[in-house]
Image (cartoon, rainbow, N blue to C red):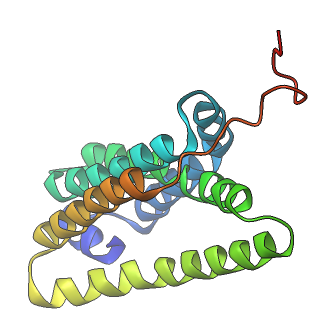
Amino acid sequence: MLPVWQAEFGLAYAALGALRTLFSGTLAALQVPSSLLAQRLGAPAVLALGTALVGGAYLLAGASSGLALLALALALGGAGASTQHPLGSSMMAHAFAGRRSLKALGAYNFAGDVGKMAVPAVASLLLVAMPWREALALLGGAGFAAAVAIFALAPRLRSARGPGRGGNSA
């Protein structure tokens, strides 16, 4: 979307770089806090909320009329995306034991790499068929659908705390 936004809003290369850095910087900075939040609310719930936030960020970016709203959308998207890797990896590691966890994590990381390639490819194809705002609306809707699926289908992980594991056995 960067070239589209450059043309739409008359942005210089430095502004595009700042937008890209805003997304990736927010994503990186909030991974540990998202993991801490997941300890309180549960990984599936936080992962679903993060995915919904990414969907909302796509919608907000599509509705943006200038650099400020676009920057807010990218910051929110980075915040939502910060849940993906740490919580997804943690859920995979908890769902499978021993050597199976290594295979599961490998498959999860591969699927994530495919997703990082597929979403921009789908966005590019959508841009051929429709205006960019509508394309982002479709991607935002897909983000919300994915959030609902994550929340509904992700197994609820049992707490690691319990008798003999630091929990209160009295």
**Percent of width and height locating residue 113:** 57, 80
**Residue situated in front as seen by the camera: 114 or 58:** 114
Q: Which residue is at 91% across, 28% downward?
A: 164
**Percent of width and height locating residue 38:** 59, 37
Decide: is 164 above or below 132: above
**Percent of width and height locating residue 88:** 60, 58
Decide if residue 75 is in sight here. Answer: no
Please tell me in which quadrant of the rendered image residue 123 appears: bottom left
Q: Which residue is at 31% across, 54% downward?
A: 148
Q: Quadrant of the N terminus?
A: bottom left
Q: Is residue 158 left or right of residue 47?
A: right
Decide: is 119 above or below 14: below
Q: Is residue 57 left or right of residue 107?
A: left
**Residue situated in front as seen by the camera: 9 or 35:** 35
**Residue situated in front as seen by the camera: 82 or 12:** 82
Decide: is 80 above or below 110: above
Q: Which residue is at 61% across, 51% downward?
A: 87
Q: How many marks?
A: 0
Q: Is residue 58 left or right of residue 87?
A: left
Q: Which residue is at 49% across, 41% downward?
A: 46
Please tell me in which quadrant of the rendered image residue 97 appears: bottom right
Q: Quadrant of the C terminus?
A: top right
Please tell me in which quadrant of the rendered image residue 95 appears: bottom right
**Residue situated in front as seen by the camera: 150 or 3:** 150
Decide if residue 105 is in sight here. Answer: yes
Check the image and name the residue furthest to the right: 164
Decide: is 17 above or below 116: above
